[in-house]
Image (tube, coloured by chain):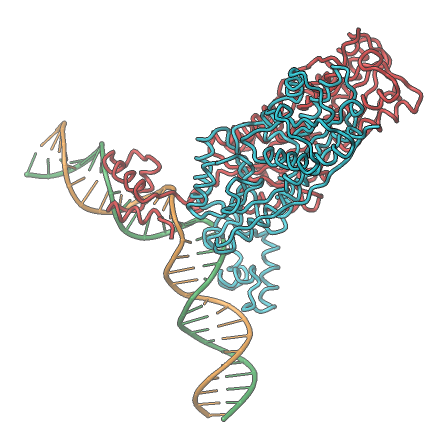
Chain colours: A cyan, B red, C green, D orange
DNA sequence: CTGGAATGAGCAAACGGTTGCACCAAAGGA
DNA sequence: TCCTTTGGTGCAACCGTTTGCTCATTCCAG
């Protein structure tokens, strides 16, 4: 049998409450007693039972991370682990543990959210998703359960969230392509279910307008963000008979595919067509040519997300906070026209 | 205040124990009573408190996943999320929750393992690491805490683990390169800290011997598995004045870098040099040229790992089990010599 | 008519901590 | 010398469930 607080109390000739207070470093226990208790705890190899403690304190120090969305691909994307790492890092420092769950469909997601909120195990939830109009979000607000969304949601003023400024991100990238001399700039991978792609598109359009370039809807190709291949989207574009001078893909992985298609068609990147992506996946710098991208700082996204959640859990759920994580345009060969 | 089992009991005019038994679907409670209780539970929106339940049952239904190793890169590798997804999928079906933690250094790791095992929150641990001689493994064995390692450890007969047969994987890949006509085959990215790379190397050597090709140690380039770039390793090899006809990299990401270096040197893949990797990352099929690789079935690795852990937790910790997950050689253009 | 299953439900003690309050001894002030 | 502080500790209730026993019916066989 495990050694409990009572065993320690007996061995130290004090009451369990004294041991408990000693552990909590209460000022009401004398130095001498504390010292004795700690020595005995050490000797008997005592470790508090967090479950019992949680029950008594009505606080578990556990948060939940929910990977939403029905697509398994979200899980696979390189920035996901980075976000996780960011969360884990800050959580560890704050003595919080992380419960992770993923939903493969909406029913499952509903069930998980229900479980996470009602069973009393998690004190807050971090939502990994930029899904538009997610019913779980509404539910969480209704029951006033602390949660933070990583990725800007559609009802941005009614929830806590953390994200990059993707409009600006899209704007910067577009401006960059304009600056290197592109006039016909295609935009690949707009997925109306992901606000991040819509935001980047918005930035793209703004940049074009600011530079007096007319927006050509034919240059905007919809796709399923991470599911579709850049190869196919690029093909779709060029099948229209369009050969752009610049291509912006909503994700580096799409950009890789696009470049492949361009190469097959005998077009050189960047000389014939400049290509850029987003998210700066690990491979982007090793690619041929190295891909211009935007580092979204996924680690900070996770770290800041947790911090926001922490304040949300403490506060009385009164105001809604947001955090914008800076991103960085990383210019590489794929957009360096001669 | 939350509604508790006592509230339900009062409302239903029964005792708390009856409610508890009704929830557990005990045969000792009559159908009529159960029905009444369930109705009231529904009405009052009751959800059992898992913490209290865990305390009473002495069982939490939570397992821990520990991402070991001091390198953050392990977290970033594309197969990591896949493993996680596999674990999550089976865990969900078995009503288990997943606590995830990552250690950034050995001290932290020791602390986390200690916490995970002593605090009574997790009933078993899944170790994600192939680290050689990890002190945590010895500790876990000593205290007889249920755990399973994903990745073959060095003391393979004294622990539970799940992995691919990486010797065979290395063998197959090497044989494949030999079959397409390579004679001088380089092997990139051997990291003595990762058994997976040593195993693949072993298979490589066996295949060479079986085909009467002499092993040339100059062709074997050490590297830090995922940290080093294939570009650098390939350079290191060719700086020796060696131009191999085939290259096997311990990871696809390394292979990508190697190909880049080869291209810069004016060598064509696959015609001049055939190149292959392992792990079949999502990008491998879109790469130019599409990369020959081995699908390690990371999802199954995770799923099976959890299953093993489950049996380990139930059993009396008597025998040690292992599971070998089948892998699949995926031949693509990068090794298709004309 | 009675004794003993069989059935359905409740009592109360865990599970391992935390915490408000009471208590007591020693110290300090009047 | 007595009365109040003050510092240190213990008592016991509580957190929300589970579960080993006990107990009260009902029913049926002998």
Image quadrant of residue A236? Answer: top right
Q: Nearer the viewer, residue A277 or B261?
A: A277
Place of residue B293 in the rendered image (x, y in percent of width and height, measured from the top left) = 71, 18
Is residue A75 among the parts visible in the rendering?
Answer: yes
Say left or right for B197 vs A155: right
Say left or right for B160 vs A13: right
Residue at far top of view:
B338
Is residue A1 among the parts visible in the rendering?
Answer: no
As drawn, B23 above or below A290: below
Image quadrant of residue A325? Answer: top right
Total number of numbered labels?
A: 0
As drawn, B181 above or below B57: above
Place of residue B52 in the rendered image (x, y in percent of width and height, measured from the top left) = 42, 47
Q: Nearer the viewer, residue A216 or B66?
A: A216
Say left or right for A48 vs A219: left
Q: Nearer the viewer, residue A85 or B136?
A: A85
Place of residue B297 in the rendered image (x, y in percent of width and height, measured from the top left) = 62, 21
Place of residue B304 in the rendered image (x, y in percent of width and height, measured from the top left) = 57, 25
Residue shown at 62% from the left, 28% from the top: B161
């Amino acid at each position: 049998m495990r050694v409990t607080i009572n065993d320690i109390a007996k061995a130290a000739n004090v009451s369990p409450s004294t041991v408990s207070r000693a552990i909590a470093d209460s000022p009401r226990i004398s130095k001498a007693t504390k010292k004795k208790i700690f020595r005995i705890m050490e000797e008997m190899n005592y470790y508090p039972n967090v479950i019992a403690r949680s029950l008594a304190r009505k606080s578990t120090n556990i948060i939940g991370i929910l990977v939403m969305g029905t697509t398994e691909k979200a899980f696979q994307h390189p920035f996901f682990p980075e976000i996780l790492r960011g969360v884990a890092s800050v959580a560890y420092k704050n003595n919080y543990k992380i419960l992770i769950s993923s939903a493969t469909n909406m029913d499952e997601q509903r069930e998980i959210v229900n479980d996470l909120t009602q069973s009393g195990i998690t004190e807050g939830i971090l939502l990994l998703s930029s899904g538009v109009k997610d019913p779980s979000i509404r539910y969480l607000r209704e029951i006033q359960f602390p949660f933070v969304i990583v990725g800007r949601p559609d009802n941005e003023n009614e929830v806590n969230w953390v994200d990059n400024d993707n409009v600006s991100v899209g704007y910067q990238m577009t401006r960059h392509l304009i600056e290197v001399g592109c006039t016909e700039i295609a935009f690949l991978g707009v997925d109306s279910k992901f606000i991040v792609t819509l935001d980047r598109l918005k930035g793209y359009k703004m940049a074009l307008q600011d530079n007096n370039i007319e927006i050509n809807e034919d240059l905007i190709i919809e796709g399923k963000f991470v599911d579709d291949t850049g190869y196919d989207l690029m093909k779709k574009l060029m099948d229209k008979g369009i050969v752009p001078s610049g291509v912006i893909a909503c994700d580096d992985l799409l950009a890789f595919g696009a470049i492949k298609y361009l190469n097959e068609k005998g077009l050189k990147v960047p000389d014939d067509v400049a290509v850029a992506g987003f998210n700066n996946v690990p491979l982007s710098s090793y690619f041929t040519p190295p891909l211009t991208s935007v580092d979204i700082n996924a680690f900070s996204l996770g770290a800041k997300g947790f911090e926001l959640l922490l304040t949300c859990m403490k506060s009385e759920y009164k105001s809604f906070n947001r955090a914008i994580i800076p991103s960085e345009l990383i210019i590489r060969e794929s957009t360096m026209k001669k």
